[in-house]
Image: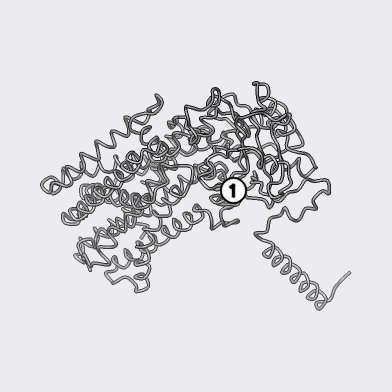
Amino acid sequence: MSISRRDFLKIAGLSGLGIGFSATDLLWKRGRADAVEYMPSPKGLTAKRWAMVVDLRKFRTEEDYKRVIDACHRIHNVPDFGNPKDEVKWIWTETFEHAFPYQRNEYLPEGIQEKKALLFCNHCDNPPCVRVCPTKATFKRRDGIVAQDYHRCIGCRFCMAACPFGSRSFNWRDPRPFIKEMNPEFPTRTKGVVEKCNFCVERLAKGLKPACVVASNGGMIFGDLADPDSEVREILKTHYTLRRKAELGTRPSVFYIIGGEEDA
Amino acid sequence: MLEKALIGSRRYWGWIFFLLAVIGVGFIFYLRQFSYGLGLTGMSRDVSWGLYIGQFTFLVGVAASAVMLVIPYYLHDFKKFGKIVILGEFLAVSAVTMCMLFIFVDMGQPIRIMNVVLHPTPNSIMFWDALVLNGYLFLNIVIGWTTLSADRKGVAPPSWVKPLIYLSIPWAVSIHTVTAFLYAGLPGRPFWLSAIMAARFLASAFAAGPAFLIILALIVRKLTKFDPGKEPIQALGKIVTYAMIANVFFLLLEVFTAFYSRIPGHMSSFEYLYAGLDGHGKLVPLMWVSVVLAAVSLVLLINPGTRRKESLLVVACAAVFVSLWIDKGFGLIVGGFVPNPFERVTEYWPTMPETMITIAVWAVGLLVLTVLYKVAISVREAQLESGTDSSH
């Protein structure tokens, strides 16, 4: 089949136009989060601002903490290097006096100073890590979750310097050989990128609560801070809670009940 | 003009090949870091920046200090700097090159470096730092090269370069201010959260940079036929003196605020650096070396009798340079991370591969400096021979 010069020019012109259009389309879409292009599952849990209450009164034995930590680290393929230098962690424990260093008070009721708190990303409303990231690899979602794009992160670790809560870990080396049991449902990470707790976005999308909440036997309560009738708001209304380093103005979304009478 | 760097004595080539060998060794270590990851360094979850970022911070200051020659020469018509202002500009080129390399070797995913350009993020200070550093590199290459070419031909530099020279002055201030903002705007690091950080950075820069330049000028005089002259060196000596006094003053302001307010978070990094904290004190000896060197340098610099003696001035300059290298290239960065956000102490010390990579980056900087200085000095030597010394 032969085409005339005129037809050829017509086709070439149209193709050129097409390429031009897709290029402008590409430019147009730049800077918009790709996430909006997915169709969310109707089963998914949604909120205006996700938040967590950690009721430390419900954590009595080492096993109570371990169950929660293991649940998270197992499903998220968090490696265990067995040394503090390479350490990667999403959720861990720290004694009250170190978890809340500005609340130090040697006259607290017995046992409080040494009481262990569960620590993880605060998903701040005003996150310094997001402010400093030079590539938007870490960003705040519309539901308040501070997420991390492992494929965009350049590993500059500015976010680790910026986070006042030590919530972020860096992959100092290839983590894959140190994952005990690989969960194929969740991505593993590569060396040279930062990671942290993601409030189980992958589970929320499927209509499931975060893994730690499920494993905590009521010690961790998850819900919408923007909804006055939510469970977390009910608890915050009736209990005295603390946030870590609230004076820094990052507005953490994680609240702690330290002591007092336990609810029935 | 670059061909002048290809003609040199045996000693010149010996030095070039020595630097290339050092770079080669460092490169092998870098390949190892590239494949293993940054775990090869002494950094950890708690001290997540170390020697690399410290060197970067220190060298931004060295780069900015070129302005200490540009301002007197171009704004105040201080003619005695005419022949050596090029040494300052080329030092800036070398220092910014090192800065960029130190950022690069510190990246966890260096092959993704273009993400900074693909996803520009103006709310990140890192974005601005990349912008001003690249701009400053460009300005100094263009200005240095153009003025030197004009000089070689014995003509006045083209008029379009003047606005660039004036632009380079606030630009130099901006590179170090923006670098200070990397640290001074972080809520959870009280050691860095200080409004005087940028001013302190500039003061230490204007001390360390010119001090290094004096040492370089004396080396140039010794090894080549080009003599930068006694008076420019003395003028630089005065700049180092004032800047070093300002730097120590600013540091003491920080100490006052921390220890008179007695806010634990503001005191603890100082305690760690200068006295040790919770039984950890790896950096204490180093920090006191910095203090002693600063004191020695101030005695030598403030006293006009010792400052005017070049043999003592060079000692003072070396003391300033090493003192500030420790203070800013090491203590300032590590100190910001200790204690960690849980008020616990994790110590940091660079590993051997990390040190070798650091030395190699310095060798790259010295190589760039050597080549550029060779060109500049060849032009000056040719002027001396033909008697067309055109100090404008």
Which quadrant of the figure contains the N terminus of chain A? bottom right
Image spot of residue B280 (x, y percent): 40, 26
Query: Is label 1 in a helix, a strand or a loop?
Result: helix
The residue tagged 1 is B112
Image spot of residue B303 (x, y percent): 13, 46
Rendered position, A223 above or below A77: below
In this rendering, position of residue A189 left or right of residue A157: right
In this rendering, position of residue B184 left or right of residue A90: left
Q: Residue at x 51, y 55 (%)?
A: B127
**Badge 1 sits on which subunit?**
B
Residue placed most toward the observer, B264 or A29? B264
In this rendering, position of residue A51 left or right of residue B147: right
Going by the numbered disc 1, the residue's amino acid type is Arg
Choose top left, top right, bottom left or bottom right for residue A94.
top right
Q: Residue at x 53, y 36 (%)?
A: B38
| Residue B5 seen anywhere in this rendered image of the structure | no
Residue placed most toward the observer, A228 or B93? A228
Q: Residue at x 37, y 27 (%)?
A: B281
Rendered position, B322 above or below B351: below
Image spot of residue B29 (x, y percent): 49, 35
Rendered position, A50 above or below B38: below
